[in-house]
Amino acid sequence: MRWLRKNLIGIVAVLVLVYLFIPIAVIMALSFNNPKGKFNLSWNEFSLDAWTDLCGVPGVCSSFVTSIEIGLVATLGATLLGTMISFALVRYRFRGRSTTNLLIFLPMATPEVVMGASLLALFLNMRLPLGIVTVTVAHVMFIISFVVVTVKARLQGMDPRLEEAARDLYANPRAVFRYVTFPLVLPGILGAALLGFSLSFDDFIISYFNAGTLVTFPIFIWGAAQRGIPVQVNALASLVFLVALAIVLGGQFLGHRRRKALENPKPILVDTLSRS
């Protein structure tokens, strides 16, 4: 009992992680399956057909590429706008600042059905044809709140003395932003961009309302679920997860190397500093 009380938090954390990753493991396992019928729900036999022929089912690769394109464009636009809004809310005082802070959180709290229907009504009143443009604009409006919250948290956690030290060393505002502020905020911006891309790529409700005849990857899966989801969908989903995992592990590895370099500076740098 003493050992259990001591390690209870770690045990619960491991169980939660296992519970979260079980569906992903099932999807990856079924991507190597050769089902008997149309429905890939139970294991039959091992096969690499889905991985060697990812585009074997008509429409699966085109919808996947469409979701990638929309996600990249929407993430770029939302990250740029959201970063500027975050700087304005944190660094400046202006009339309506508290109201803007409140309005930023509303899209996050609004159900996606309400937002999707509202955007559809807006586009129809503006007589915009539904398609890739309307979906991209809708995703930007949906993602931007998450970007603002993420970057804003990073800005509020910064030490202002670092920028003050740069200004004391006669650095102009542009140099302070380029060499001090931006490198410190960059991890928050990259994290917000990854979060925004994940939300855009995964979104179904808002895309379904504003897509028209456009078929994104989630819409393709929803349509295929009625007649049997092909194994290629499992393979593409596994591929997306592996790429995301590689990006996260790569970021952790680079951060670890950077921390080790700061803790153990090179002898040449130490000698140079000691001589100066």
Image: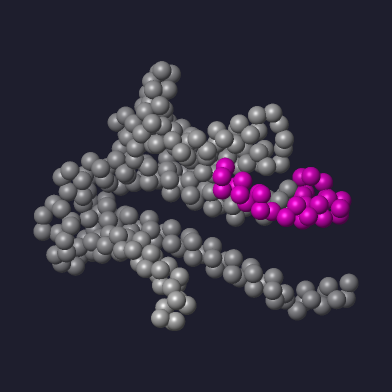
The residue at 42%/40% (across/down) is 70
Q: Position of residue 100 (x, y in %)?
A: 60, 33
Give the x, y percent position of residue 235. 29, 57
At horizontal 46% and vertical 38% (from top left) the residue drawn is 109
Q: Residue at x 30, y 60 (%)?
A: 23
Closer to us: 58 or 214: 214
**Number of numbered discs visible in the structure rendering:** 0
Task: Spot the residue most to the front.
Answer: 1
Q: Using residue 65 as the reference point, say whether residue 168 is left or right of it.
A: right
> What's the magenta region?
148-176
Predominant SS of the magenta segment? helix
Judge left or right: residue 49 versus residue 154.
Answer: left
Q: Where is residue 253 shown, x and y percent of the image?
A: 54, 68
Taking the spot 51% from the left edge, 64% from the top edge, the residue there is: 250
- The image quadrant where one finds the N terminus is bottom left
Asked whether residue 172 is drawn in magenta, I would say yes
- Residue 153 magenta: yes
